[in-house]
Amino acid sequence: MSVEQCEVLRELSSNFSYQALIAVKCSLCVMAICAISYQWCKQGVRFLVHDNTKIVFKLYYALNLFISIFHALFYMFELIRLRFDCYVVNFRTVLLSKGMGISAIIAAQYVIMIISFERVYSALFPAHFEKHSDKRLAFVLSLTMVIVFIVKICVVGSPIP
């Protein structure tokens, strides 16, 4: 580690506005964890009719909870890290943690697309949809969409389809 990097870290650790910003972000993530958990437990997916849609929407809840937990942990780690003199995190750890959080955010949007496609399919072919729909199919489709996105973002570097 160079002297310049240590100086920057010392400046950040003594900067109240930076620490306040990180603390606010962390508290917002913790509030999001509480809100998502409360919403999931209180209302859940009872308002949905079809089992496939319920499974996909549960995945959406889980992804949002994962995003909030991951970002809250990262911001807590940042607050703790600022207390130590000249402690630098490996860049791979930072890229992995931020990349996973961003990937989960965009994957949650893909889950909404899955629900939309499922609803269109059920509207166009209602008899076939009811006859051949399966809980495993919804789970596999959701998991496939998330895995395809994560692989794509890692290989190509672009979340845009």
Image: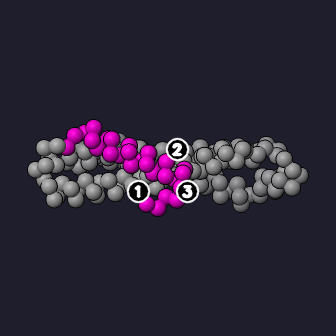
Left or right: residue 35 compared with residue 50: right
Task: Tell me, yes or no, whether the highlighted magenta stretch contains residue 143.
Answer: yes
Q: Which residue lies furthest to the top in this view?
A: 136
Q: Which numbered disc, 2 or 3, marks the residue closer to the eye?
A: 3
**Residue position for label 2:** 69
Q: Given contact means CB atoms under 8 Å apart, are the residues at marks 1 and 2 in contact?
A: no
What kind of element bears circle 1?
helix
- For label 3, count other residues whose C-alpha is less than 10 Å away and answer few (under 14), some (14-19) or many (20+): few
Along the polypeptide, which appears first: circle 3 or circle 1?
1
In percent of the image, x 22 and y 40: which residue is there? Answer: 134
Q: Which numbered marker is on residue 109?
A: 1
What kind of element bears circle 2?
helix
In percent of the image, x 59 and y 43: which residue is there? Answer: 73
In percent of the image, x 19 and y 43: which residue is there? Answer: 133
What kind of element bears circle 3?
loop
**What amino acid type should be assigned to the residue bearing mark 1?**
Gln
Q: Which residue lies furthest to the right in this view?
A: 3
In percent of the image, x 61 and y 55: which residue is there? Answer: 24
- Magenta segment: 133-161
Give the spatial CA distance, label 2 vs label 3. Answer: 24 Å
Q: Eyeballing the image, is 21 above or below 59?
A: below
Q: Nearer the viewer, residue 39 or 56?
A: 56
Q: Which numbered disc, 1 or 2, marks the residue closer to the eye?
A: 1
Horizontal and vertical percent position of residue 7: 85, 54
Horizontal and vertical percent position of residue 39: 37, 48
Q: Is residue 2 visible?
A: yes
Task: Tell me, yes or no, whether the highlighted magenta stretch contains residue 45.
Answer: no
